[in-house]
Amino acid sequence: MMISALQSEQKYQGKKRKSADVYPFLQTYIAKRQQQISEIEQMIDRYEKKRLAEERAYQSMSSIRRMLSGKKPDHHLAVEYIHYVKKPLERIAELRKEMDTAQSILVKSRSEDQVELTDEIIKELE
C-alpha cells in the first residue's frame, strides 16, 4: 500500500522535474526527433522524385500512346500531394517545435533547477 502511494505520488508530481534528472532524456529526445524529421524528409524526397519520373515518362511518350495511357486527374495529384508532402511537412513543423522546446529547456536551466516539462515530453519520459 505504501509503495503504491509513493509510486503514484512520483508519477503525478506535476510537470516540474529536476533538470539534472531530465538532461540525458532530453538529449535523446532531441536526437530522436531529428531522426524522425530526416526520415520524413527522405520520404518527401522519394515521392517528389517518383512524381518527376512519372511526369518525364508521360511527356516522353508519343501522342497516341499518351491518349491511350491516360494521366492521373489533377485532383488525384492534389490528394497525393497533401498526403505525401503537405501533411508530412506539418508533422516536421510540430517535431521542430517540440525539439526547440526541449532545446530551450536544456539551454536555459541549470542542473539544480526545477524545469517545467510539456505534455509531449512527459509522455515520452514515462
Image (spheres, helix red, strand yellow):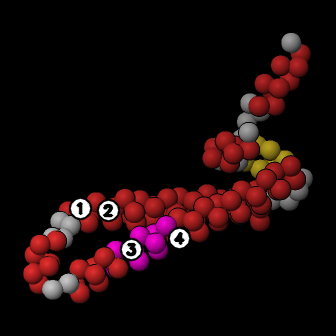
Q: Are marks 1 and 2 in contact (CB under 8 Å)?
A: yes
Mark found first going from the N terminus, 4 or 1: 4
Type of amino acid under label 3: Lys
Residue at the image position 37 percent from the left and 59 percent from the top: 83
Q: 10 and 42: which one is in front?
A: 42
Do we see residue 89 in this rendering?
Answer: yes
Q: Are marks 1 and 3 in contact (CB under 8 Å)?
A: no
Mark found first going from the N terminus, 2 or 3: 3
Instruction: Say if 13 sits above or below 37 in the image.
Output: above
Instruction: Say if 64 sits above or below 96 in the image.
Output: below
Q: 36 and 51: which one is in front?
A: 51
Q: Which residue is mark 2?
A: 80
Give the mark toward the camera: 1 or 3: 3
Q: Position of residue 89 (x, y in %)?
A: 45, 65
Which residues are the magenta region?
A: 43-52
Locate residue 14 relative to residue 64 in the image: left or right.
Answer: right
